[in-house]
Amino acid sequence: MNPEIKSYFPILNQEINGHPLVYLDSAATSQKPTPVIEALKEYYESDNSNVHRGVHTLGNRATEKYEGAREKVQQFINARSTQEIVFLRGTTTAINLVAQSYGRTNVEEGDEIVITYMEHHSNIIPWQQLAKERGAVLKYIELEEDGTISLENVRAAITDRTKIVSMVYVSNVLGTMNPVKEVAKIAHEHGAVMMVDGAQAAPHLKIDVQDLDCDFFAFSGHKMVGPTGIGVLYGKKHLLEAMEPVEFGGEMIDFVGLYDSTWKELPWKFEGGTPIIAGAVGLAAAIDFLQEIGLDEIEKHEHHMAAIAMDKMSAIEGLEIYGPKDPAKRAGIVTFNLKEVHPHDVATVLDMSGIAVRAGHHCAQPLMKWLDVTATARASFYLYNDESDIDRLVEGLRSAKEYFSDVF
């Protein structure tokens, strides 16, 4: 990876607690490059207006940028049509939309919803609520010892009563890269639809929803060098057309009468109210930035970073790494614990040296239970990280180990 990439991220050019910042929390949110910041600034300084409704110049320019961003997303994930691209607040909102609209219409008492133990809470709770409401059965695919899933266990979990299978593409804790294409095939053999949580995948891998043949795919802009508050739901056109909106108001209507209303065509019937215009503009700039570097190069770089980090961190006595041991089976996420030291304490000591990692349950409490821990620390790498960041992390972990050994 070109070392000059880091220079595009102004926030990284600072000191934290007297040390140069090492940002290893990109799985929570990524930092933003200058082209994205400038795109947002230019929009607000030159083009800011509401979209679709006006006939004046600013309104037309804003609409062109907003709908242009939709076209860019369509090409980015290789959807068939812009009608299959819905702009929402993020992955959480997208999954909830599928659960509340598609789920309520198609899931009945005794039907099954299948997920895994490694899901983020946003891909668990909507299905829990749907199962309670509809009298459905929520099932979990068993994990292998290394935190991967086998297709044998997938086949054992999915039956002819299964209506929805929802799975994370890349685990935000284990870094596991799941075989979602193969799982989608199994789901379809039983008449179920496949929902993919792509929040940790879209920033790091080349996505082709037609090749995956998933029915729904969700991701968030802020994890892929874009702004917060913007996300995408991809859905196959025939499924979205049959779904009812769950938010009602301006912008999404066709005709409003005194006692009944009709909706706009796709995708606007799901985008009630003033949409996330600036967010879409920023997301388009983020896609341009990532594609200029190349998603294949980013993926290769992250596998390399994970391999080096796991090798060097494994040399620290008392440090346990969770997830697949083979770096080729995981994204650039390394989750770990230091024996007899709480992960929050580890993160605090690292922060004193200017190193930002995440500590806690990572919105994955069922997975923490499966791992038999209450919390973990997590270092997540992205395109702006290099080997010197790993060296700083390892040095910081050794210092933390020595510090707490002296204290206790």
Image: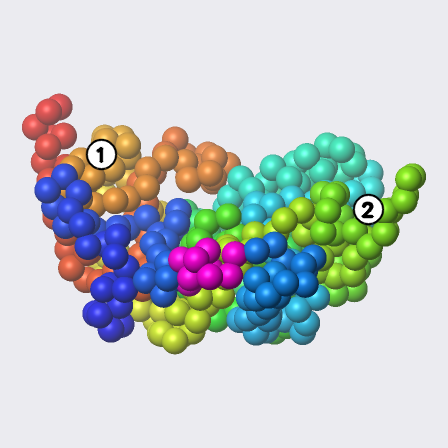
Label 2 secondary element: helix
- The residue that label 2 is drawn on is 105
List x then y, in percent, for residue 370. Answer: 46, 38
Nearer to me, 276 or 405: 276
> In the image, is 280 to the left or to the right of 98?
left
> In the image, is 48 to the left or to the right of 30?
right
> In the image, is 165 to the left or to the right of 308?
right
Residue 142 in sight from this viewpoint: no
Residue visible at 82% across and 38% down in the picture = 109
* Residues tagged 1 and 2 counted as in contact (Cβ below 8 A): no
Q: Residues within 10 Å of mark 2 (few under 14, many from 20)?
A: few
Q: Earlier in the sequence, mark 1 or mark 2?
A: 2
* Magenta stretch holds residue 67: no
Query: The C terminus is located in which quarter?
Result: top left
- The residue that label 1 is drawn on is 348
Check disc 2 and give the amino acid type: Thr
Query: The N terminus is located in which quarter?
Result: bottom left
Check disc 1 and give the amino acid type: Thr
Cα separation, mark 1 vs mark 2, equals: 47 Å
Magenta stretch bounds = 39-48
- Find the residue positioned furthest to the left: 406
